[in-house]
Image (spheres, rainbow, N blue to C red):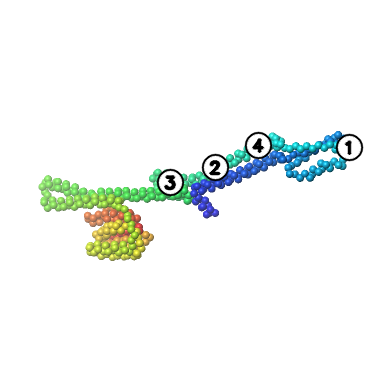
């Protein structure tokens, strides 16, 4: 019963409408046949048999008396009982014997005219009912079909779509559109839900992008204050010192050197913003490669970087030869940014660990330095710029985080024995 109900719900709109029409037509035809049959039977009962006739027998007796008798005869009736016509009067007295017998037959030429007024009215009403009833039933069949089809197949999804449209119009995408039928309206609701999810994801991504830009602007504005304040301070000092003639040549060279460093810092900030904005144009180009092979290549390259910086590199690799889909260019760019940061802050060694689970490649880089400052962890990786050492900006972390998101992954920052960065990439 449940499976039949599910099949009925999963019918397409066309098939559902056809079955509903056929069912309604069958119902109308059945009731029409019943009404016509009842009316026909009643009309037949009202009318006498048009094939029947009255046999009238008129006998004149010898004494002059006349007797008349009538007998109703029907078509196909057995006539043997009529033998009494000849023998019925054999035993009567002579004076009462029949002198002459006359026979006459009267057929019902028009049975309707023989009905009483009330029966005629009933006969006419039955005739009208036999004609009008099928038309009325057909009309109600159409109305029933329309109402049933609308209530069962159109009204529920239309109400859901109308509600969803009003929610989207009010900029609320935090809802779910669910319609269980598998017909065309179900497909439309499913497509609408996919559109809602896409809008929700796009809206979320846009919001995150705007939030990142806001944080970037706030961070740039914050970081620009120091070099600008230094430049302003030195220019005011130079202005007053030159007017008073109290600045020595050595002091002047020192001030010029500091001004040059501040100008370079400003240039680095603007270049960092340009790099972050340019990341939006990068597209992901995945290729099929062995997980073990890519890990061995990364280990070889990172070991060279570590040796150049006189840092020990320890590697933990549990990967197999399983094929993965990955953009190696983006992967190396991410690793180089993170590895450069680790090399800057590591004291003696760096640990590089590879793992693969549920189509997610994880690469963990841990240094034995002093770790991330609390302000970076507190902001949950949203800080685009972070000064861990004088003159160094955390632009590498910001770039790597953007690239990981493009590859369907993320970056996790936390402290263990030192700073630990875990790169997760969808493969």
Identify the image quadrant of the C terminus.
bottom left
Which label belongs to residue 95? 1
Above/below status of 38 relative to 305: above
Task: Quote the CA–CA distance across marks 2 and 1.
Answer: 79 Å
Residue at x-position 75% and y-position 44%: 77
Earlier residue among tags 3 and 1: 1
Mark 3 highlights which residue?
164
Q: Is residue 244 left or right of residue 312?
A: left
Q: Residues within 10 Å of mark 3 (few under 14, many from 20)?
A: many
The reply, left or right, for residue 197 in relation to residue 119 is left
Considering only vertical position in the picture, is 24 above or below 340? Answer: above
- Determine whether the residue tagged by mark 1 lies in a helix, strand or loop: helix
Identify the mark nearer the N-term, 2 or 4: 4
Residue at the disc numbered 4 = 124
Q: Residues within 10 Å of mark 4 (few under 14, many from 20)?
A: few
Q: Nearer the viewer, mark 4 or mark 3?
A: 4
The location of residue 262, given as percent across then percent down, is 19, 51
Residues under labels 2 and 4: Cα distance? 28 Å
Q: Residue at x 38, y 45 (%)?
A: 171
């Amino acid at each position: 019963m449940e499976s039949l109900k599910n099949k009925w719900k999963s019918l397409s709109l066309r098939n559902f409408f056809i079955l509903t029409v056929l069912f309604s037509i069958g119902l109308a035809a059945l009731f029409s046949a019943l009404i016509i049959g009842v009316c026909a039977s009643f009309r037949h009962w009202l009318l006498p048999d048009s094939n029947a006739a009255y046999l009238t027998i008129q006998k004149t007796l010898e004494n002059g008396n006349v007797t008349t008798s009538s007998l109703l005869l029907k078509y196909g009736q057995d006539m043997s009982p009529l033998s009494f016509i000849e023998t019925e009067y054999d035993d009567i007295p002579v004076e009462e014997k029949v002198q002459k017998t006359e026979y006459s037959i009267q057929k019902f030429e028009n049975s309707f005219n023989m009905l009483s007024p009330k029966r005629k009215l009933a006969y006419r009403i039955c005739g009208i009912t036999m004609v009008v009833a099928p038309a009325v039933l057909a009309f109600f069949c159409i109305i029933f079909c329309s109402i049933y089809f609308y209530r069962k197949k159109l009204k529920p999804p239309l109400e859901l779509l109308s509600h969803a449209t009003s929610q989207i119009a009010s900029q609320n995408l935090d809802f779910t559109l669910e319609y269980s039928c598998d017909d065309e309206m179900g497909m439309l609701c499913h497509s609408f839900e996919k559109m809602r999810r896409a809008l929700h994801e796009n809206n979320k991504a846009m919001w995150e992008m705007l939030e990142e830009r806001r944080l970037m602007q706030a961070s740039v504005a914050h970081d620009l204050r120091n070099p600008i304040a230094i430049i302003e301070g030195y220019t005011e000092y130079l202005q007053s010192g030159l007017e008073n003639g109290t600045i020595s040549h050595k002091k002047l060279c020192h001030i010029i050197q500091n001004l040059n460093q501040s100008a370079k810092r400003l240039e680095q900030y603007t270049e960092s913003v340009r790099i972050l904005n340019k990341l939006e144009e990068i597209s992901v180009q995945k290729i099929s490669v062995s997980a073990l092979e890519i890990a061995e290549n990364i280990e070889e390259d990172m070991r060279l970087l570590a040796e150049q910086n006189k840092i020990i590199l320890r590697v933990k690799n549990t990967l197999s030869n399983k094929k993965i889909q990955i953009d190696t260019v983006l992967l190396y760019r991410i690793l180089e940014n993170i590895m450069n940061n680790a090399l800057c802050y590591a004291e003696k060694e760096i640990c590089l660990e590879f793992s693969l689970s549920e189509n997610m490649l994880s690469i963990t880089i841990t240094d034995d330095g002093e770790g991330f400052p609390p302000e970076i962890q507190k902001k949950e990786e949203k800080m685009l710029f972070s000064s861990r050492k004088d003159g160094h900006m955390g632009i590498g972390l910001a770039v790597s985080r953007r690239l990981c998101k493009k590859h369907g992954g993320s970056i996790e920052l936390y402290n263990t024995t030192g700073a630990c960065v875990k790169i997760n990439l969808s493969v």
